[in-house]
């Protein structure tokens, strides 16, 4: 049982390049999330998907787009990468069947992204 | 708006000593509160959560936290530190209305000395 799988684990981009970060979960979870983690700032929510077919903005959505391709997969796209997007990106999921209890439950190991 | 403040970016304890990691929250609505742990090069793992049932919450690995509304605190404790507890710990808050926007603190790195 792999849980939440993120690819790639590391990536270096040049300013202006585009890239898609992939995330897949095998737990049949309804809700999925994308976070970025920066030193001294904890995790900040970029986008989330409460259920298949829906996506919503989080705290820091500018410069990103997402796709909930199906129940398993939730991808994050940087259309024109900027140095400020250098960060560690985490995908997470949760069952989501209990109303009022929607915090992320299972995390991937992260994608370390550097933009030069 | 909700926010979380973790007091101390680094905490160092000796093996066998009490672990106390401090978290204060701000919320205009009844909160849910969480502690997560992150080991190097891994994602976060949920340690425990407060969802308005019991104020003293027990989690995995011997950790527990107490919700104190009067102090707006949710400190994490463990009676006896183990070397394997060395990690970064994050406190987080979300609202009880079912919101998805969990707010994380900046994190506290715990060092355990032999």
Image (cartoon, grey):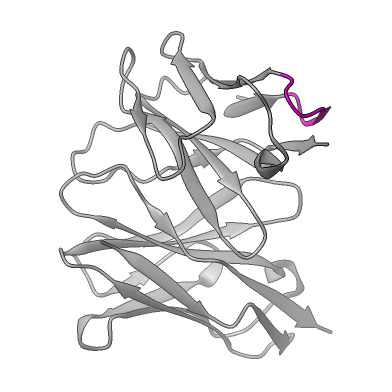
Q: Nearer the viewer, residue B113 or B27?
A: B27
Image location of residue B88, percent across then percent down: 65, 65
Location of residue A32 with respect to A44 vertically, above or below = above
Q: Residue at x 75, y 54 (%)?
A: B40
Please say whether residue A59 is one of the residues in the magenta stretch.
no
Q: Nearer the viewer, residue B89 or B58?
A: B89
Which quadrant would residue A55 be assigned to in this image? top left
Magenta region's main secondary structure? Answer: loop
- In the rendered view of the protein, which quadrant contains the N terminus of chain A? top right
Q: Residue furthest top?
A: A70
Please say whether residue A16 is one of the residues in the magenta stretch.
yes
Q: Is residue A116 left or right of residue A104?
A: right
Image location of residue B90, percent across then percent down: 53, 64
**Residue span colored magenta:** A8-17
Q: Is residue B30 left or right of residue A63?
A: left
Image location of residue B109, percent across then percent down: 67, 72
Location of residue B104 with respect to B100 vertically, above or below = below
Q: How many marks?
A: 0
Q: Residue at x 18, y 39 (%)?
A: A99
Which quadrant would residue B61 be assigned to in this image? bottom right
Q: Residue at x 39, y 25 (%)?
A: A29
Q: Nearer the viewer, residue B90 or A81?
A: A81
Image location of residue A78, percent across then percent down: 61, 24
Location of residue B13 with respect to B55 vertically, above or below = below
Q: Residue furthest front?
A: A16
- In the rendered view of the protein, which quadrant contains the C terminus of chain A? top right
Q: Residue at x 26, y 46 (%)?
A: A101
């Amino acid at each position: 049982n792999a849980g939440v799988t993120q690819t790639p684990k590391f990536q270096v981009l040049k300013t202006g390049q585009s890239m898609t970060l992939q995330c897949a979960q095998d737990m049949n979870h309804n809700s999925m999330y994308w976070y970025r983690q920066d030193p001294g700032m904890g995790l900040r929510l970029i986008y989330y998907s409460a259920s298949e077919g829906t996506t919503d903005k989080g705290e820091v959505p500018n410069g990103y787009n997402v796709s909930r391709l199906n129940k398993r997969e939730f991808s994050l796209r940087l259309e024109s990468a900027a140095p400020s997007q250098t960060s560690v990106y985490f995908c997470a999921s949760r069952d989501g069947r209990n109303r009022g209890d929607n915090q992320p439950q299972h995390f991937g190991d992260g994608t370390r992204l550097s933009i030069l | 708006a909700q926010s979380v403040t973790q007091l101390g970016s680094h905490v160092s304890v000796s093996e066998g000593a009490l672990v106390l990691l401090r978290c204060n929250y701000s919320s205009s609505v009844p909160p849910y509160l969480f502690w997560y742990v992150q080991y190097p090069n891994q994602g976060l793992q949920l340690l425990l959560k407060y969802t308005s049932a019991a104020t003293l919450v027990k989690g995995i690995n011997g950790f527990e936290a107490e919700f104190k509304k009067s102090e707006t605190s949710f400190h994490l404790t463990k009676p006896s530190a183990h070397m394997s507890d060395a990690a970064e710990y994050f406190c987080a808050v979300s609202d009880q209305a079912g919101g998805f926007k969990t707010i994380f603190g900046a994190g506290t790195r715990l060092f355990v000395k032999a």
